[in-house]
Image (cartoon, helix red, strand yellow):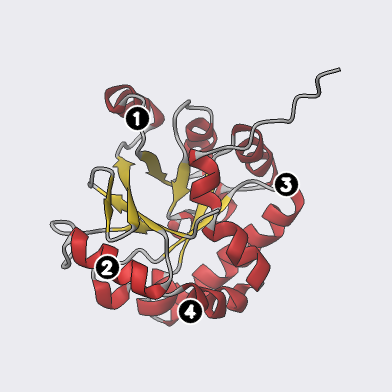
Amino acid sequence: MRYTDACVYPHPLGDSSLRRMALEAGELGFDSVVAVGAAGATIRGVEIVGGTLLQGRDPREVQAAVRRFGQGSAIPMVNAGDYTFNRAILHIGGIRVLRDIQSSPRNSFDHILSRTAAERQVAVDLDISPLVRGRNYVRQKTLHRYADLVRLQSRFEFPLVISSGARSILEMKSPRDMVALCRLFGLDEEGVGQALMGISRLLHPEKPVEVVE
């Protein structure tokens, strides 16, 4: 399995070129990155996985965006909203990652949606950027939300992924940095490792073993 930073924003969405971010990711210890707005490629041994952040104020708009996006090798992602929005999003075929859960209302993702995410193999992203650059209130809110997610994930086993949310090479973090930050909300080193392999599992799901008699 491969370690992947599940969301970075290369130029023009961020300040650093895709090439520089790929080289930095390799130096930090990643095998791949999900780059929003980029096409799939390999740069100095680092795989670039295209990421598409689907926009929409209501689920119907997101569903229309999924149809336009089509089936491809890129990762379709959606920012979380309120409970009704998230419930509908989880039932739209093709969505792979639910992001920005820390900015959504507190009760927007519960045990029912956790079970749905597990059944449909939709990953929840833990974006560490609010812990790095957020102010005290934002940091505390993020810590509480992520602690809730870790507890739900340990019970329902929906996929987790971790992203730096970096818009510059200066904001990119190593797996070791992510371990240190994730310990603040109760995700241990093994859990971080599993989450860093989450994108690889989404792209290459394990097939059930068929027993031939």
What distance separates the C-alpha of mark 3 from that of mark 4?
Answer: 26 Å
Type of the residue with mark 2: Leu
Q: Which mark is residue 177?
A: 4
What distance separates the C-alpha of mark 2 from that of mark 1?
Answer: 25 Å
Which residue is label 2 attached to? 23
Which residue is label 1 attached to? 72
Q: Residue 111: image x %, image y %?
A: 70, 46
What distance separates the C-alpha of mark 4 from that of mark 2?
Answer: 18 Å
Task: For mark 3, give the secondary structure.
Answer: helix
Mark 2, mark 1: which one is toward the viewer? Answer: 2
Q: Relative to 107, is 182 above or below?
A: below
Mark 2, mark 3: which one is toward the viewer? Answer: 2
Type of the residue with mark 4: Asp
Mark 4, mark 2: which one is toward the viewer? Answer: 2
Mark before the other along the chain sequence, 1 or 4: 1
Left or right, 140 with reference to 153: left
Q: Which mark is residue 50?
A: none
Q: Relative to 136, is 96 above or below?
A: above
